[in-house]
Image (spheres, rainbow, N blue to C red):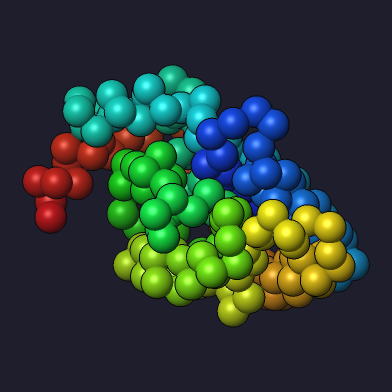
Amino acid sequence: MTARRIVVVSAGLSTPSSTRLLADRLGAATAAALDSRGVPAEVEVVELREHARALADALVTGFSTGALRSALDAVAGADAVIAVTPVFTGSYSGLFKTFFDVLEPDALAGRPVLVAATAGSARHTLALDHAMRPLFAHLRALVVPTGVVAAPEDWAGGDLSTRVDRAAAELADLVAGRQPARRTDPFDEPTGFADLLRAG
């Protein structure tokens, strides 16, 4: 059986990053859930901090090249995406939004997505429903019912592990029931952000 590709997009800014830690836990839990269903999985992490300058250039020039192009192609060719952002002023980070702004408009159409966030307080849990779910609904992704928010007090408790496992299981159920995603042809002409603006 062909291994399913799970791409984890992490928008953490620091090193080490609690956002990356949550991203890694979700990726590992999803791979384990797929393995328990007899479906092999490969997990790849896209660390947006490494592409910050290239993302700004892509917004200005309308084109994505190099490592950023590879990251965008990885997301477009994934069987499922796990999207994790820190919460800033009640919403996703600007870096997180910029990445999905330069992603091709149909790249996530019909694709399973798990949304998660790290926050300074449990009060920011609503960022999932008020910001992240509408974003991925606009991109026509299939967002799993359980989202995960990790506040500082969550890391020491068992409830975070329960939520991670539940969300991962929901994502694994969607992935296991689908045909593998069409792989992105590296020789396809990339769609630039400027092209999207003209088309819109």
* 47 horizontally vs 63: left or right: right
Q: Residue at x 37, y 24 (%)?
A: 54
Q: Residue at x 54, y 69 (%)?
A: 123
Q: Number of numbered discs present?
A: 0
Q: Give how far across and how far down residue 3 sits, in percent.
A: 75, 51
- Image quadrant of residue 162? bottom right
**Which one is nearer the viewer's eye here, 181 or 159?**
159
**Which one is nearer the viewer's eye here, 131 or 100?**
131
Q: Give how far across and how far down residue 148 sits, in percent.
A: 64, 66
Residue furthest left as drawn:
198
**Which one is nearer the viewer's eye here, 48 or 159?**
159
**Which one is nearer the viewer's eye here, 93 or 39?**
93
* Residue 156 visible, this orientation: yes
Q: Is residue 52 above or below residue 22?
A: above
* Residue 112 visible, this orientation: no
Q: Is residue 10 above or below residue 111?
A: above
Quadrant of the snapshot with the N terminus: bottom right
Q: Residue at x 28, y 24 (%)?
A: 57
- Image quadrant of residue 33? bottom right
Q: Give how far across and how far down residue 29 sits, in percent.
A: 80, 59
Quadrant of the snapshot with the C terminus: bottom left
